[in-house]
């Protein structure tokens, strides 16, 4: 079959740029349409749940009314999913969890229904639900990634690393820097036990950099490992170098296979000075250092940071052996995480039937 005349004809000047622009606008319109459909669906479910709550409270309707309602709605709308008794009970729980209509419209309706079910199923505290909901919106987490963050206790680990950021960085950068670090970091996806050596951990983190970036959190971009620094003719190598897009600074990460020692900060400080002088540009903020160790004495870490003039943080990392058995088996595989990160997106499909 021969090529059509159109495919053989050279497009006019400027056509390629115009086509690329059109594709971008069409894609953006598709995303807005998907978001609009999702928003309307979540708001509809909230309104149904609110009505069920109100009628059960005011008129004393029992639980069996949900079975009847599910049957009648399915009969009236046979092509529409989401009217199972189970999902109607979720609607009631959703309305009970979020009684504020304004909050539902402005926040909860930005997430797909499946994400909202994860928040209902996995969390009991309204404060925890609000925090994970906000993070899921901010970072566009897929449902699986949201599950992972809840499984590994992201809220409890965020912003608790020992740092000197408050004294060494101006606000609001110091607050953002503190919230960007965790303690401990979960490296269970590496499949390594506590006996693993520093270089083995480093190699595995680079091999699985997708999962490592997910654990580090939003904003981190991988620059390189064993990054060479030539200082006065001597060669030095940084374990891992990142750039934080929101903080607009380089982040040096050093791995230590044992317990934290104050002298570790001397080496880290040397690397920060070298990166500031050789790598960072005038537009970049001062480089931040993160020392990751298997364990630390918090008081010793605070003392060690007390006289340091460069912004640094100290946190622990946990390998496979440190996780409870039930958590090890419930965490998704590396392949699942990679699929979520590369193919994840907003879905309005209801799988709660």
Image (spheres, grey):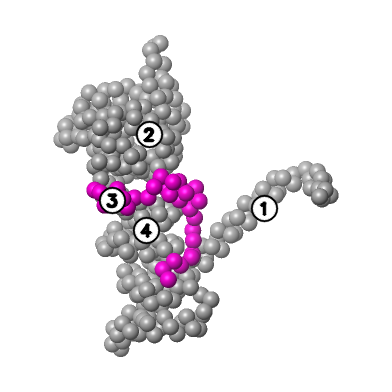
Q: Which callout, 3 or 2, points at the residue further toward the start of the chain?
A: 2
List the residue tagged with mark 2. 204
Whether the magenta-drawn stretch holds residue 332 is answered as yes
Q: Which mark is residue 272?
A: none
Query: Label 3 vs label 1: CA separation?
Result: 46 Å
Q: Which callout, 3 or 4, points at the residue further toward the start of the chain?
A: 4
Q: Secondary structure at mark 3?
A: helix
The answer to whether mark 3 and mark 4 are in CB contact below 8 A is no
Q: Residues within 10 Å of mark 4 (few under 14, many from 20)?
A: many
Question: Given this view, does label 3 or label 1 mark the residue nearer the observer?
Answer: 3
List the residue tagged with mark 4. 133
Q: Which residues are magenta?
A: 324-353
Q: Secondary structure at mark 2?
A: helix
> Where in the figure is residue 226, as x and y percent of width and height?
40, 25
In this orientation, which residue lies closer to the viewer: 273 or 213?
A: 213
Query: Label 2 vs label 4: CA separation?
Result: 31 Å
Viewed as shown, does residue 90 lie left or right of 166? right
List the residue tagged with mark 3. 327
Say if 285 sits above or below 45 in the image. above
């Amino acid at each position: 079959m021969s090529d059509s005349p159109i495919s053989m004809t050279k497009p006019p000047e400027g056509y390629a740029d115009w086509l690329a622009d059109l594709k971008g606008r069409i894609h953006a319109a598709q995303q807005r349409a998907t978001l609009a459909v999702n928003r309307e669906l979540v708001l509809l479910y909230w309104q149904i749940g609110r009505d069920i709550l109100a009628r059960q409270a005011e008129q004393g309707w029992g639980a069996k009314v949900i079975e009847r309602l599910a049957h009648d709605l399915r009969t009236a709308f046979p092509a529409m999913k989401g009217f199972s008794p189970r999902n109607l009970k979720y609607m009631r729980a959703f309305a009970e969890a979020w009684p504020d209509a304004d909050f539902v419209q402005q926040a909860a309706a930005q997430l797909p229904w499946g994400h909202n079910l994860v928040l209902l199923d996995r969390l009991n505290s309204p404060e925890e639900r609000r925090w994970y909901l906000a993070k899921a919106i901010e970072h566009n987490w897929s449902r699986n990634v949201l599950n992972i963050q809840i499984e590994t206790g992201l809220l409890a680990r965020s912003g608790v690393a020992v740092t000197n950021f408050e004294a060494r960085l101006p606000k609001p950068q110091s607050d953002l820097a503190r919230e960007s670090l965790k303690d401990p970091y979960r490296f269970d996806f590496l499949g390594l036990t506590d006996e693993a050596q520093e270089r083995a951990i480093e190699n595995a983190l680079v091999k699985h950099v997708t999962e490592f970036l997910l654990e580090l959190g939003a904003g981190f971009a991988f620059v390189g490992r064993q990054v060479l620094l030539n200082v006065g003719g001597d060669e030095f190598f940084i374990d891992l170098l990142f750039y934080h897009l929101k903080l607009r600074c380089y982040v040096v990460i050093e791995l230590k296979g044992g317990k934290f020692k104050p002298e570790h900060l001397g080496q880290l400080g040397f690397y920060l000075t070298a990166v500031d002088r050789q790598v960072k540009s005038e537009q970049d903020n001062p480089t931040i250092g993160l020392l990751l160790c298997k364990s630390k004495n918090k008081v010793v870490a605070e003392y060690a940071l007390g006289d340091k003039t460069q912004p640094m943080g100290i946190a622990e990392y946990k390998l496979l052996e440190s996780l409870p058995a039930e958590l090890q088996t419930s965490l998704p595989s590396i392949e699942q995480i990679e699929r979520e990160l590369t193919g994840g997106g907003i879905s309005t499909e209801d799988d709660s039937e």
